[in-house]
Amino acid sequence: MATTHRRIETQDAKALRSRRQHFAAPGGSHDRIVGFLARALPMAVGVLAAVMVITPLGPRGEISFLLDRNKVAMIKERLRVDNALYRGQDAKGRPFSLTAGEAVQQSSAEGIVRMDDLVARLLMTDGPARLSASAGQYDINDDIVAVAGTMRLATADGYRMMASGVSVNLKDKTLTGADGVEGEIPAGTFRADRMFVDLDARTITLSGNARLRMVPGKLRMP
Amino acid sequence: IGGHNSNAPVSFAADRIELQDRQDRVVLSGNVQITQAGLSLSAARTLLNYTDAGSLKIQRIMATGGVSVSRGNERAQGDSAVYDFNRRIITMAGNVRLNRGSDTLRGGRLVIDLASGVSSVDGAASGSSSVTGATSNSGGRVTGTFSVPQN
């Protein structure tokens, strides 16, 4: 009932009322608060709704962002990996791993991955061996690394080999070189047109005006 | 012309070289030319044994198929030859022909001692002892022609 008209009551009745009754009486402080809130709260809801609508459009910075396909950093190649690691198994089922500082595959059409400072860790009959090269192209399908520059092999028992112009077949652990190879092993340095090396059996077959030079005396590790 | 240094670097040239590192062996074939400090050996096929325990040491070179060894003005030819690096001698066998300057010597077997430069030719291919002169089989004479200066 609206408390607009005054009530008829004696001064004595007013004095007898307790504090809770004063608080609850119509026109008391509780009524004024409730009356004020009845008008203030709907207005606050309106203001809040307005604020929530307006602020995202305001100029002050973007809180949410939209992933724009054109502005994202795109690579043209199919694959570009830093510190790449590739694991595989050779013909006898022994694992090998191929790590590279950077591996780039231009397109999926050619299964060639260009690698820089690559290191292949192989498992030979007499222990692990490490084969490193400054750059090479790795053919994924038949596990052949065409080494650009010089390749170095170091095996567990201290055998060293260095060769350039070769490609390494990781599947059956052989090296082949077709147009001009040269290299060095502890026994001497060699050079030839073509070369076939079986890393496990450590046989090096040079053909086509092959040259070999052996220096008796101190073993020279390549 | 003795005093050949058997520890000098040895360089090989051939059509085909096969290095078998585990067996410490090198097989060369196809007009092989081996040169070491003035001594050069050429043959059709050669086999080289070496040891690489600690330091590289070439043990011997066995050459077959028309071997010719030349050094300075001395040139020796034979069917097969064995160059023993440890005893520093070259032994050739099988119709050996040795010519030094304009002199020639033929026989069954030739031993060149690289330390002293003495080349001794033996009649029989299987050799005979220079002391008793006894040879295991008959035949096998040593023939030679020497040119005497005119003055």
Image (cartoon, coloured by chain):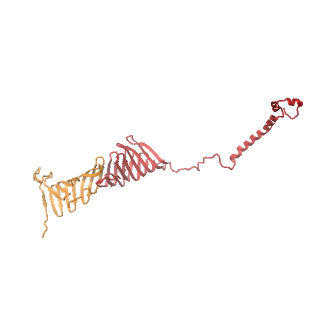
Along the viewing direction, whichever of A209 and B51 lies nearer the viewer: B51
Tell me the residue at 77%/41% (across/down).
A43
Tell me the residue at 45%/44% (across/down).
A86
Left or right, residue A133 beside residue B17? right
Q: Residue furthest bottom?
A: B151
Report the chain shown in red. A
Left or right, residue B93 beside residue A54? left
Instruction: Judge whether B134 appears above or below B148 on screen.
Output: above
Along the viewing direction, whichever of A152 and A113 lies nearer the viewer: A152
Along the viewing direction, whichever of A94 and A83 lies nearer the viewer: A83
Left or right, residue B7 beside residue B102? right
Judge whether residue A8 can be spotted in this image.
Answer: no
Judge whether residue A130 can be spotted in this image.
Answer: yes
**Quadrant of the image occupied by residue A127:** top left
Whole-percent x, y for residue B135 in the image = 11, 51
What hue represents chain B?
Answer: orange
